[in-house]
Amino acid sequence: MESIVITGAGTGLGKELALLYAQKGYEIILVGRRKEPLQCVQQQIQSCKGRAVAFPLDITNYEQVHQTAEALCHTYNITMLINNAGIGHFGPLEHMTEQHIHEMIDTNVKGTIYMTKAFLPYFKTLPEANIMNIISTAGLRGKVNESVYVASKFAVRGFSESLVKELAETNVAVTAVYMGGMNTPFWDDSNHIQDRSRLRSPKQVAETIINEYKRQAEIIVE
């Protein structure tokens, strides 16, 4: 059975991607900071006769990421990595704290790079492997009160586009996904979005991503 690693899999889009890919017969390796949400998704998948395992992991910890990746690659038939985990803090730049800046750069940028780097050598040994980076439309254009968040997403966009070229002659496909805002717990501690009812559901976005995915360089879900 093929396995898919999904970061930020305890809530929102990561959770919905996990549920839908599990329905398609993949074993899902659920990665995230907090164990409880991952276990809830694991139980939900298992209740539908699917297979999933929960792996709490701090993707900003380089050594921990590489140790976990090595262990997972020895145990599971992993053919896809979905870098979905992300953190956002919003407001005027002068209100951003040093901690806010570090959290967004460390999770959104470094976390994506660390995870990709850790799995890439293994992926290159496979007949076919896939890396999907969930970026959001913040990686396509600047937005008011999102300067650092947008900067982090532009970085992942550049990282993804460069990897597409770097791995063009290999068996590893890299896809960048750009989607608009979704009604998820991502916004629970923010008043940046006043009317969340106009946002799409993460399940709708997950369905679109999976239906459109053909190992192409980018998917845009506005």
Image (tube, rainbow, N blue to C red):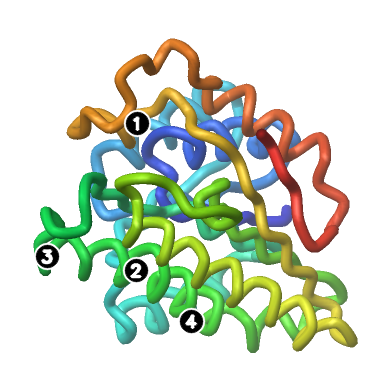
Going by the numbered disc 3, the residue's amino acid type is Gln
Query: Which residue in the protein does label 4 denote?
Result: 70
Q: Classify mark 3: helix, strand or loop.
A: helix
Residue 217: which disc?
none
Sequence-wise, which precedes: disc 3 or disc 1? Answer: 1
Going by the numbered disc 4, the residue's amino acid type is Glu
Q: Is residue 58 above or below residue 177?
A: below
What residue is at 49 percent from the left and 42 percent from the top? 14
Q: Classify mark 4: helix, strand or loop.
A: helix
Going by the numbered disc 2, the residue's amino acid type is Ile
The residue carrying pointer 4 sits among few (fewer than 14), some (14 to 19) or many (20 or more) residues within 10 Å by Cα, namely some
Sequence-wise, which precedes: disc 3 or disc 4? Answer: 4
Query: Which residue in the protein does label 3 denote?
Result: 99
The residue carrying pointer 3 sits among few (fewer than 14), some (14 to 19) or many (20 or more) residues within 10 Å by Cα, namely few
Sequence-wise, which precedes: disc 3 or disc 2? Answer: 2
Q: Nearer the viewer, mark 3 or mark 1?
A: 3
Q: Are marks 3 and 2 in contact (CB under 8 Å)?
A: no
Instruction: Using the numbered discs, state the Cα–Cα distance from disc 3 to disc 2 in whole angstroms.
Output: 17 Å
Q: Nearer the viewer, mark 3 or mark 2?
A: 3
Residue 119, quarter of picture? bottom right
Instruction: Using the numbered discs, state the Cα–Cα distance from disc 1 to disc 2 in whole angstroms.
Output: 20 Å
Instruction: Using the numbered discs, state the Cα–Cα distance from disc 3 to disc 4 in whole angstroms.
Output: 30 Å
Q: Are marks 1 and 2 in contact (CB under 8 Å)?
A: no
The x and y percentages for residue 23 are 69, 30
The x and y percentages for residue 59 are 34, 68
Query: Which residue in the protein does label 1 denote?
Result: 40
Query: Which is more toward the observer, 135 or 51?
Result: 135
Query: Which residue in the protein does label 2 denote?
Result: 59
Sequence-wise, which precedes: disc 2 or disc 4? Answer: 2
Instruction: Using the numbered discs, state the Cα–Cα distance from disc 3 to disc 1 in whole angstroms.
Output: 29 Å
